[in-house]
Image (cartoon, grey):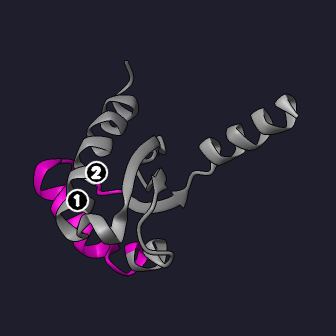
């Protein structure tokens, strides 16, 4: 397993924990870190989040709290170069449900 893959697994755990500590459940809803991609030059960590419920403006507030979340993540992950966290909303679940509904008629 490459170092970036190992970091991606650890980022997934630490970001989920930091989001849970930063936002109450009624704001964040139920969320899952669907994928984390750490670029090979460690400049970015792209994080895809899927969620159910919560506030409509959650991703806007997540973006505003990005520095606080990054600080918490980097307290637990010790690396020389700290990648910039980039959050993406993952619509895979909704897309799969839509496709299934089309197939089933």
Q: Give the residues drawn in magenta, as a range.
A: 62-83
**Residue 67 coordinates in the image, percent (x, y):** 29, 74
Q: Main secondary structure of the magenta part?
A: helix
- Circle 2 sits in a helix, a strand or a loop, which is it? helix
User: Which quadrant, please, contains the C terminus?
Assistant: top right
Which residue shows up at 25% across the image and 42% down it? 13
Place residue 84 in its image quadrant.
bottom left
Q: Nearer the viewer, residue 17 or 36?
A: 17
Q: Nearer the viewer, residue 101 or 69?
A: 101
In the displayed orientation, state which residue is furthest to the left.
75
User: Which quadrant, please, contains the N terminus?
Assistant: top left
Q: Please determine whether, in this image, residue 5 is positioned above or below residue 28.
A: above
* Number of residues whose C-alpha sits closer than 10 Å to that of mark 1, classed few (under 14), some (14–19) or many (20 or more): some
Left of 93 or right of it: where is 17? left
Q: Nearer the viewer, residue 59 or 81?
A: 59
**Residue 16 coordinates in the image, percent (x, y):** 28, 51
Left of 55 or right of it: where is 67? left
Q: Which mark is residue 72?
A: none
Q: Which residue is mark 1?
A: 20
Which residue shows up at 60% across the image and 42% down it? 93
């Amino acid at each position: 397993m490459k170092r970036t893959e190992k970091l991606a697994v650890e980022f997934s755990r630490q970001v989920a924990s930091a989001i849970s500590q930063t936002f109450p459940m009624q704001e964040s809803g139920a969320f899952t870190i669907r994928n984390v991609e750490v670029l090979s030059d460690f400049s970015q960590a792209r994080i895809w989040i899927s969620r159910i419920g919560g506030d409509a403006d959650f991703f806007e507030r997540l973006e505003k709290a990005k520095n606080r979340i990054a600080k918490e993540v980097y307290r637990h992950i010790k690396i020389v170069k700290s990648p910039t966290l980039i959050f993406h909303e993952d619509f895979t679940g909704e897309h799969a449900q839509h496709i299934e509904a089309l197939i089933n008629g």
